Amino acid sequence: MPGTVIVGAQFGDEGKGKVTDFYAEKADIVVRYQGGNNAGHTVVVGDETLKFHLLPSGVVQGKRILIGAGVVLDPRVLKEEILHVREKDREVRLGIDPRTHIIMPWHNLLDEGRENARGATKIGTTKRGIGPCYADKAERTGIRFEDLVDGEKLKEKISEFYPIKKAILEKAYNVRVPFTQEDIFKEYLPLGTEFRAFLSDVSLEVSEALEKKKNVLFEGAQGTFLDNDFGTYPFVTSSHPISGGVSVGVGIPSTKINRIIGIVKAYTTRVGFGPFPTELNDSMGEHLTEKGNEFGTTTGRQRRVGWLDLPMLRTSMRLNGFTELAITKLDVMSGLDTIKVAESYSVGDKKIKFFPYSNKGLEKAVPNYEEFDGFEITGDEKKYSQLSAGARKYLSFIEKELGAPMKLVSIGPGRLDTVEK
Ligand code: GDP
Ligand code: IMO
Ligand code: MG
């Protein structure tokens, strides 16, 4: 293994939680490197379903779990999540980097205020305060985990920023602030005290672990096309889910990463607004939504669905450098008469094989579809050779087009519904 990254190849919700849990068995440490509780990762083991927004999914396998500097952390959500895991008699062996930025109550209000002010250009954020927290980090007006666990520093920072945020919320967004400075201090100070024991220099801990040849799994949140630079800006998140995000989000050189697993859903989904060239707004779309239970893990919103998109995946391959692929939700494709895959796009009389860099270009892109005969997945397949010829043909096509081996096929939500190749 040693440095292995799990990256969502599309718009998020590809099944990263499931695959992380599967590979975590062989890992010593599982690390989140970006995003925050906008993520919703589902792990299904037997008849138990666990959903994580902040804790790395490796917690289910009882591994050491780390939150890197590139994450934005809401301590209120962390408290709830830890409680939830402990209630299920699972151990939480957590470390949090001192440089990790903290989501404050004003970030949630700003997220909502900005969205409402945007009108027609709404992003459809999760309203978890992610964007405003990253904005403060970039503006150098953030509160870090090292401040949260130091009561004096926390008080100082809250006193400095609260009046400014309150003024912005009230004057720019016409939002009433329902809490005082003192309220925040009362809520956050005990959280800081409680979490002090989790403080760990994650950059150092991961570097030393890799030096000792331990297996470290980096669990991406969101997906490639929600990347702040390389996604469908402005319909993106505020962090860098792509594999390059690991280096800056954890504080290790990229040369320490030798395995990059692209998680590809067998079709495409997207939550929130923004371009989606292969979107299906018909009965096929409804069928996939229903069969795939495509409702958001974090906000419960219905996900938009569409066919698999190779220009998108080729671009994902280029951005992430996948050394292997894992395909999920293949069972959802079972029983269709015909399956379509966008093989390229036509823009005017030009054929293109990659995702255009701008949304304007994407609006003009018309997918050219390749059709495949439908296939069945029984759910009893344990080996790759037991998958039907039709399913293997679909998978081989993707593998060949992307130029990376497919090492895992997921045919159900459970840990055991997994076929390795
Ligand atoms: P993540 O954000 O990438 O971790 O994905 P989510 O957990 O938000 O969404 C994936 C959903 O699909 C979850 O409900 C999973 O339990 C489920 N899932 C994962 N893999 C499979 C699969 O192969 N087949 C089916 N039917 N469901 C799956
Ligand atoms: P996981 O890790 C799918 C989407 C939101 C919105 C945009 C910006 O479960 O795959 P934000 O709250 O981040 O400012 O919202 O990004 N989004 C996700 N979509 N899966 C996610 O995470 C997402 N996290 C954010 O719906 O369109
Ligand atoms: Mg999700």
Image: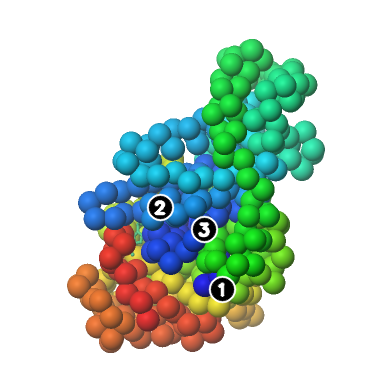
Left or right: residue 419 compared with residue 169: left
Q: Identity of the amino acid at label 1?
A: Arg
Q: Earlier in the sequence, mark 3 or mark 1?
A: 3
Q: Give the secondary structure at mark 1.
A: strand
Q: Which of marks 1 and 2 is nearer the N terminus?
A: 2
Q: Which residue is drawn at 29% across and 60% down?
A: 414
Residue 168: x and y, percent? Answer: 73, 23
Q: Which label number is shown at residue 62?
A: 2
Q: Distance between the residues labelled 3 and 2?
A: 10 Å
Q: Identity of the amino acid at label 3?
A: Ile
Left or right: residue 211 compared with residue 370: right
Residue 114: x and y, percent? Answer: 64, 33
Q: Name the residue under label 3.
A: 29
Residue 15: x and y, percent? Answer: 41, 60
Residue 226 vs 138, above or below: the answer is below
Q: Do the residues labelled 3 and 2 touch (CB within 8 Å)?
A: no
118 or 140: nearer the viewer: 140
- Residue 228 falls in image quadrant: bottom right
Q: Identity of the amino acid at label 2?
A: Gly
Q: Which residue is drawn at 41% across and 71% down?
A: 327
Give the image's coloring scheme. Answer: rainbow
287 or 28: nearer the viewer: 28
Q: Which label number is shown at residue 402?
A: none
Q: How far apart are marks 1 and 2 (CA)?
A: 22 Å
